[in-house]
Amino acid sequence: MSTGRDVFIVANSTDELGGVTGWMHRMAHLLQEQGHRVHTVGVHAAELTMALPEDPGYPVTALYPAHPPTPWTPKGVRDRLRIPARRREAARVAGKRQAVERLSGIFRAARPGGVVIVTQVWAMEWVGEAETDGLTVIGMSHESYDYSRASHRYRWIKNHYAGLERWLVLTEEDADTWAGDGMNNVGFMPNALAALPPVPSPRTGRSVASIGRLTDQKGIDMLLDAWALVAPERPDWTLDVYGAGEDEAALRAQCTGLGLDGSVHWRGRTDDVPAALARSSVFVQSSRGEGFPLALMEAMASGVPCAAFDCAPGVREIVRDGQDGLLAPAGDIGALADRLLRLTGNPRMRDAMGDRARTGVQRFSEAEIVRRWEELFALLER
């Protein structure tokens, strides 16, 4: 048992449906089991929420009841004279000042040796303005270098993370890339495998499962295009899409337009991922960008072989192509369809890859990842 520290895990939200939220609460439990005192903080309460226990066993705080307003940037002299807009901006600034002061109050309660882990770049805006004297601040990014580089978050990382004691990405490959881009404080820390189901999937159901938010990043539109190539060849198989999100209506319309309503089942969000995977024989991930995807690890832990776009270092670190899953070049719909046809058409391949996946993914066990976090805490405290 380690010496207990105060550990604050700060994210965009503490209850938003998604992998980072799941990671935050799982890490909170693991660190608490190590004897640390954990407090999870979100900038705001989410609209599309994740089911959380009524009493998770540690404090959970949202600084705002809903997403805070975006800063106002006046365009020209006339815009500056708009009184209502100026009032709204003054209210936003005052609200942010209150939120930062509330966060500072939470941090002031820490004993010496306290650690702040900022899991997402946007949340760092509030942490950066709060009082963190005497605390070690660790920044994180849960997406690949390429995905950050193509978005506004690249500038935020450069602005907010360069001065921290340490900031962490998910793979050594991305850490090396960021170091080459001038970020000298970068390290890497993989996500932990949440649990190993006691019994793997029997891989008897003729079902391909996709689990993730129905948003552009997850690429379900590309998956539907790929499934349109698979379905005529595999009339006895179904694609089960688990998840909810802003693109659901458009995706359902696309599905109908492709003539796939008979073979695609929209399962909605699920709080029982192991049960969904137990009914599946193949898992598919069609994301445009990823960090270190937990859903992929969970599928492999269930012994379900995966077909995935090779869209990030984290994906190819988890899936060893040709051994325990099949990777397709990022965005190549024909190649993803090919991988799905190979897995759905070959039960011996499915069983061999599924068994190897279940064994291999245990290298990301919770015990191993927690050990690495403890090493990092000790190193940064010196």
Image: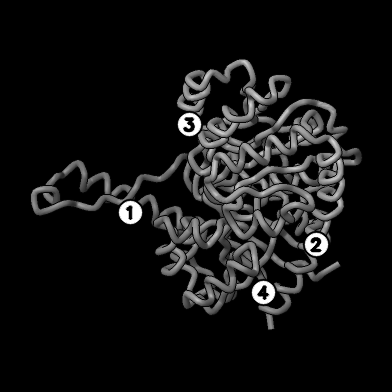
Q: Residue at x 81, y 62 (%)?
A: 34
Q: Earlier in the sequence, mark 1 or mark 2?
A: 2
Amino acid of disc 2: Gly
Amino acid at the residue labelled 3: Asp
Q: Residue at x 57, y 20 (%)?
A: 260
Foreground label between 2 and 4: 2
Badge 4: residue crowd in 10 Å (few <14, some 14–19, many ≥20): few
The answer to whether one can see residue 48 in this image is no
The residue that disc 3 covers is 247
Read off the residue under disc 1: 93
Q: Quick one: label 1, few (<14), some, or many (20+) residues within 10 Å?
A: some
Residue 202: percent from left, percent from top: 88, 32
What's the distance in space between the residues labelled 3 and 2, CA to CA? 41 Å
> Could you say which is closer to the camera, residue 369 or residue 235?
235
Do the numbered discs 2 and 4 sit on residues whose CB atoms are within 8 Å? Answer: no
Rendering quarter of residue 282: top right
The residue type indicated by label 1 comes to: Val
Q: Which residue is mark 4?
A: 112
In terms of secondary structure, where does tag 4 sit?
loop
Q: Which residue is mark 2?
A: 35
Q: Is residue 210 above or below residue 309?
A: above
**Rendered position, 268 above or below 286:** above
* Upstream in sequence: badge 3 or badge 2: 2
The answer to whether residue 142 of the structure is visible from this angle is yes
Q: Amino acid at mark 4?
A: Pro
Disc 1 to disc 4: CB gap under 8 Å: no
Quarter in which the N terminus is drawn: bottom right
The percent coordinates of residue 208 (x first, y second) are 71, 31
Camera-near label (1 vs 3) is 3
> SS at mark 1?
helix
